[in-house]
Amino acid sequence: MPSFRAFALALIVIAGVLTGCGSSDAEVGVNVASVSDMSPGQIRLPRSGAEGGCTPGDHPLRLGNGRIARLRVTPGPSKKPRGLILAFHGAGGSPREGLFVFREAWKEPGLVLLAPRSLGNTWSALHNRQDRDLETVNRALAETWKRCQIDRRRIAVGGFSDGATHALSIGLQNGGIFRSVMALSPGGLLDVERQGKPRVFIAHGTGDDVLPYSRSSKSIVPVLKGSGYSVTFRSFAGGHEVPTSISRAAVRWYLRR
């Protein structure tokens, strides 16, 4: 289980620091917090256009820094601008699992799903002062831009569990880039410097015994709504999981824009 010792002097926990237990996919339990000196997770979008190779299917991406990502291109014309979902896996997960979270998008025409891999067991920004995964995310975006034309008006970020917590952090910091944020069973919010007002979709299982349902219902959702964000909250009867119905609900919400 990742430690919060590195945050000992910088982290002021409003609702307590909670950790999820009872699963091999151990999650970092972050609740609402204030981090005074956290470096911004700045996303860089490439300026250059696509060079080709945006063919439907599942493609591995080698990023030149020893790291990997996976790109899934859905059906549709290769030269037409596509929507993009940047997908973050949960703790102990993989790019394939990041893609699987949004599996209901795989047959939707005109989309690209991009799933990088975290450096460690989970996303470093959740337990470190610096986001050591940010370089990989930006490299993965650059590789995607080389292959596909992306519609900048349809860029979303999402994830499951720790990946959902990370998606909230990255999405709220880069609201000028990400119009939509999809957090499925998140652990909490980091008080990062926010930009813009992306709309937010949150789903959580009422029987979640890893990251409790109350983290969304009593903490994340009220805080975001109180800050002026447009939030769609979907409860479901289930545990720490992404049922097909929830994947479908998230994708349909994204497509409605």
Image (spheres, grey):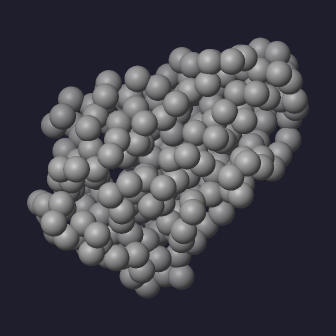
Please name whichever residue, 153 or 140, is drawn nearer the observer in this view of the structure: 140
> Which quadrant of the figure has residue 126?
bottom left
Percent x, y of residue 5 = 27, 75
Total numbered labels: 0
Q: Residue 129, position in %: x, y? A: 32, 58
Residue 57 in percent (x, y) is at: 85, 41
Could you say which is closer to the camera, residue 23 or residue 2? 2
* In the image, residue 83 above or below residue 226: above
Residue farthest to the front? 65
Where residue 21 sits, quadrant-wise, is bottom left
- Is residue 166 visible in the rendered image? The answer is yes
Asked if residue 63 is positioned above or below residue 56 in the image, the reply reads below
Which residue sits at x=30%, y=64%?
A: 30
Residue positioned 78% across, 34% down in the render: 74
As drawn, is 17 to the left or to the right of 58?
left
Q: Is residue 105 visible?
A: no
Identify the residue shown where x is 27% and y is 44%. Answer: 192
